[in-house]
């Protein structure tokens, strides 16, 4: 998988890695049983401090997304996809919540928001044949 | 607990009328990438020169890897690696010759590792240093500084003026040192690079140490607070916590604040005239500018704490 890290982004780098691994599992880019690069490899590849990578991996282990495989390294757990799909949905929910908060504090009405939502939804989902 | 790799205690150094370092105390823990930020002339290079024993402090003491910097500087220079922004190399030598020459000061494994690094850095042998590009010479200097696998690597603005590919190679090298559990002291102006690789950050401003803490905790404890006032000549209370800088732009106020309290919004009540109050995490660049911008801080002295 490819990462896209923004070192000066709002979220700390380890969180960006955690999030992107979860999204990759949810999207099927990473599948159960697949190995992830070692801390050192990924650190070199992304030019990111290895302690940061290690912290992301520890968190992914605690979140039951990765597990160590004896003598091999770290692999994606076979039961991770359900958790990661849930994680992705809650990220989407966070995004919607933030956008709503912005819109409401900016003075948009509920009806304007509903219209906007329907229009965008129509635009982004293919129309039934 | 391992002892710190670098320790400065109350170090001061004056050049004529310039106070290059003013009672600086800091400790660099073992196995971290420690970034030293500061404007040109802030005192970073003076600090590094004191650590490597090239300059004696006027007062205070410095030690590196447990050796005193003023009495044991030979021991220190032998056990650290050092790359400056303009490495002094013998121009008339070829890369392999300067490696052979330098290997005499170090252990037997030096030559082997040096040649491996040259290959990894894509440096051709048989070319004299004076015929190399600036980037290639910097890579030779880096290879020379790391081939004895030093416990501490000191980089003093090593990549200023170098292209992105060479900078990337330096970053990878630092990451690799850290992965081996070695310590790196990096003085740099490239804030985005520091954000990628640093565990700890110190900011030096006019000879004084203003910030010294893990990058994580620095960023998570520093916020940018903005609000809009009802009138541009109105005055609002300062936010709680430690205000580092204050900037006004028309009706908008913007503060960089450390340790913002949880109930920070309560400072501005219903009738304060403040609206659109928000707070976001600060980037390292914003923290750096706030710490070093004397104009933005001058405003603070006239502010009234609410």
Image: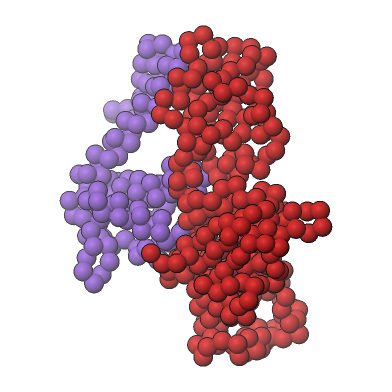
The color scheme shown is by chain
Q: Is residue A123 visible?
A: no
Side of B204 where A92 appears, left or right: left
Q: Nearer the viewer, residue B202 or A88?
A: B202
Which residue lies at the image location 24% right of the left edge and 48% below the top edge?
A63
Q: Quadrant of the N terminus of chain B?
A: bottom left
Q: How many marks?
A: 0
Q: Percent position (x, y) of residue B203?
A: 60, 50
Which residue lies at the image location 54% right of the left edge and 15% below the top edge?
B274
Q: In the figure, what tint was chain B given?
A: red
Above-or-below relation of B219 to A113: below
Q: Percent position (x, y) of residue A101?
A: 40, 21
Q: In the figure, what tint was chain A given?
A: purple
Q: Percent position (x, y) of residue A50?
A: 42, 61
Which residue lies at the image location 70% right of the left edge and 68% below the top edge?
B56
Return the residue found at the far right.
B16
Above-or-below relation of B93 to A116: below
């Amino acid at each position: 998988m490819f990462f896209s890290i923004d070192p000066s982004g709002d979220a700390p780098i380890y969180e960006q890695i955690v999030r992107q691994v979860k999204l990759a599992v949810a999207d099927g880019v990473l599948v159960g049983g697949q190995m992830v690069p070692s801390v050192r490899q990924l650190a070199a590849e992304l030019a990111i401090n290895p302690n940061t990578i290690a912290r992301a991996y520890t968190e992914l282990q605690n979140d039951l997304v990765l597990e160590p495989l004896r003598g091999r390294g770290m692999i994606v757990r076979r039961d991770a996809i359900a958790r990661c799909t849930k994680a992705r949905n809650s990220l989407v929910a966070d995004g919607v919540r933030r956008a709503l908060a912005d819109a409401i504090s900016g003075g948009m009405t509920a009806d304007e928001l509903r219209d906007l939502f329907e229009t965008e939804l129509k635009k982004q989902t293919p129309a039934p044949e | 607990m391992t002892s710190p790799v670098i320790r400065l205690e109350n170090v001061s150094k004056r050049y004529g009328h310039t106070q290059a370092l003013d009672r600086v105390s800091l400790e660099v823990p073992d196995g971290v990438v420690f970034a030293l930020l500061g404007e040109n002339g802030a005192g970073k290079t003076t600090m590094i020169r004191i650590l490597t024993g090239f300059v004696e402090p006027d007062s205070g003491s410095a030690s590196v890897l447990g050796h005193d910097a003023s009495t044991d500087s030979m021991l220190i220079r032998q056990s650290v690696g050092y790359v400056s922004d303009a490495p002094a190399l013998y121009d008339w030598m070829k890369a392999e010759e300067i490696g052979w020459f330098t290997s005499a000061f170090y252990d037997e494994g030096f030559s082997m590792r040096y040649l491996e690094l040259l290959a990894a850095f894509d440096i051709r042998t048989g070319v004299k240093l004076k015929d190399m590009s600036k980037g290639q010479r910097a890579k030779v200097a880096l290879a020379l500084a790391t081939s004895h696998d030093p416990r501490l690597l000191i980089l003093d603005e090593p990549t200023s003026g170098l292209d992105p590919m060479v900078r990337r190679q330096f970053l990878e090298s630092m990451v690799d040192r850290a992965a081996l559990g070695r310590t790196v002291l990096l003085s740099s102006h490239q804030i985005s690079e520091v954000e990628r690789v640093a565990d700890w950050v110190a900011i030096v401003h006019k000879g004084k140490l203003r910030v010294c803490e893990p990058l994580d905790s620095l960023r998570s404890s520093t916020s940018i607070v903005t609000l809009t006032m009802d009138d541009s000549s109105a005055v609002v209370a300062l936010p709680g916590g430690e205000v580092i800088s204050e900037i006004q732009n028309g009706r908008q106020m913007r503060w960089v604040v450390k340790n913002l309290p949880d109930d920070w919004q309560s400072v501005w009540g219903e009738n304060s005239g403040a609206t659109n109050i928000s707070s976001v995490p600060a980037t390292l660049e914003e923290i750096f500018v706030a710490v070093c911008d004397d104009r933005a801080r001058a405003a603070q002295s006239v502010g009234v704490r609410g």
